[in-house]
Amino acid sequence: MSLYKEILYEITGSVAVLTMNRPDTLNALTDLTQAEIRHALGESEKNADVIGTVLTGAGRGFCSGVDMNALGAMSEAGERLGNVHEHLASDPGNPDDDPNFRVATAYFLGLRKPLIAAINGACAGLGFSYATFCDLRFVDRTARLTTSFAQRGLIAEHGTSWMLPRIIGPAHALDLLWSSRKFEGDEAYRIGYANRLCEPGECVQEATEFLEQIAASSAPMSLMMMKKQIYRHLNQELGSAMVESNQWMDESLGRGDFKEGVSSFVEKRPPDFQRIMID
């Protein structure tokens, strides 16, 4: 019997595919869905065979945001509500306990492994925030996205105000946040929100193939450290980022992955890099 009730979690080869599985609601998020997603991402972290995870939705939607029943309850109470699911307790990523990666969807940035959003359909509200905090976004051409916050009398939630302008710039971010208008995959790609524009129904496959390709050619430790560099250094000035990068570069030169990378190149064979082992 599966541990999860509202998501599907499958591993094929080096890739985990995490599917939000409430298609009748366009995969609207409940507290349970969010807890299951967090737990499953923790499982990806601990599995040395997994190079990265694809996050997607079942049916016609990626994720339509918070379940409207939960929104109604929050509206009545005038505050956030939440249930604790102790059997799903998990604290994935963020091995340095960086305070920037503790709150809400920001924990995606502290994961040790790549996380790609495969946006196959409707993507709104908190679902849009989830996609925004993934490392890459592969978007079906026919997908429809919207921030939706302003239309609910809310602000840019869940760190979107920090992350979105870093992806598409402040003017595009304000356009999408102020208007809450719907936009499709072509525009998402044009403004830089989508990293890949996919034909309908192809985004999960293309995201999976991308991860399989880097699994065959790139060192997992290098992927982890590059992700750490990018997000950690967004919060630093250039000087301190350079000093830290030089220190980490020296450490990488002393690891077996560097020797293997050079040897495999010279010998014209696929590399055999070490996997990331997490207790």
Image (cartoon, rainbow, N blue to C red):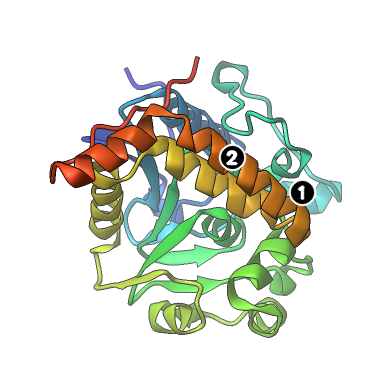
- Please tell me whether mark 1 or mark 2 is closer to you in this view: 2
Neighbour tally class for label 2: few under 14, some 14-19, many 20 plus, Cα within 10 Å: few
Residue in the foreground of this view, choosing between 86 and 268: 268
Residue in the foreground of this view, choosing between 44 and 75: 44
The residue at the point 33 percent across, 76 percent down is: 141
Disc nearer the start of the sequence (1/2): 1
Residue in the foreground of this view, choosing between 2 and 163: 163
Q: Is residue 5 left or right of residue 150?
A: left
Q: Which mark is residue 125?
A: none
Whether residue 236 is visible, yes or no, is no
Q: Is residue 52 left or right of residue 128?
A: left
Where disc 1 sits, the SS reads: helix
Q: Position of residue 6 (x, y in %)?
A: 44, 36
Provide the residue designation for mark 1.
Answer: 74
Query: Based on the displayed image, in which of its 4 quarters is residue 166 positioned?
Result: bottom right
Provide the residue designation for mark 2.
Answer: 248
